[in-house]
Amino acid sequence: MNPIHQNRRALSATEIVTQLTQLNGESAQGWKLIDGAIEKTFSFPNFHETMAFVNALAWVAHREDHHPDLALSYGRCTVRFNTHDVDGISASDTFCAKAVDSLLKD
């Protein structure tokens, strides 16, 4: 197991803001804190590319043993991470969010 997932704890509000700033950089569109989870919507030109993204994301989630909630439609996938066993957002969530972002980097 990746050490980031051991001894998890809920991040403080300040830590969450810091992590989101690091995840998003200068991007106005990115991960957002919504209802106790970090969430981002990814858009694609067609269903095939949406499903390719979801399948790659599933591999990351399986590898890390940390699974997001997904909302899927024709050209969109919304990804939500939170950590149920700490009842909040943990370093596991931001780590996996970064791994999901890296799926779309050139």
Image (cartoon, helix red, strand yellow):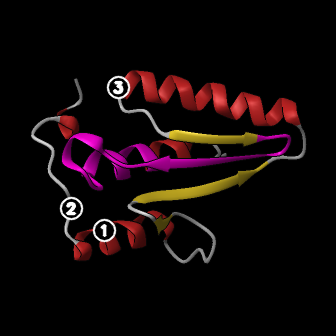
Classify residue 84 as left or right of residue 25. left
**Residue at which label 2 appears:** 11
Viewer-nearest residue: 67 or 29: 67
- Relative height, residue 6 to residue 81 (above, below): above
| Quarter assignment of residue 62 | top left
Asked if the stretch drawn in magenta spans residue 77, the answer is: yes
Report whether residue 78 is seen: yes
Return the x and y of residue 83 as percentages of the image width and height: 30, 45
Amino acid on which the number 1 mark rests in the picture: Ile
Asked which secondary structure carries label 1, the reply is helix
**Total marks placed:** 3
Give the image quarter of residue 61.
Answer: top left
**What is the x, y in percent for residue 31?**
52, 63
Label 2, label 3: how far apart the Cα atoms are: 19 Å
* Image vertical order of residue 10 relative to residue 70, above or below: below
Label 2 residue SS = loop
Residue stretch in magenta: 73-97
- Front residue of this view, candidates 74 and 42: 74
Instruction: Please report whichever mark, 2 or 3, sits nearer to the chain's N-terminal start.
Output: 2
Q: Which amino acid does the dot numbered 3 rest on? A: Asp
Whether residue 105 is visible to the viewer of this picture, yes or no, is no
The answer to whether the residue labelled 2 contacts the one labelled 1, judged by CB atoms less than 8 Å apart, is: yes
- Which residue is outermost to the left? 7
**Residue 16's mark?**
1
Q: Are marks 1 and 3 in contact (CB under 8 Å)?
A: no
Q: CA distance from mark 1 to mark 3?
A: 21 Å
Query: Around disc 1, counting alpha carbons within 10 Å, would you say few (fewer than 14), some (14 to 19), or many (20 or more)?
Result: some
Q: Which residue lies under the disc numbered 3?
A: 65
**Cα–Cα span, label 2 and label 1:** 6 Å
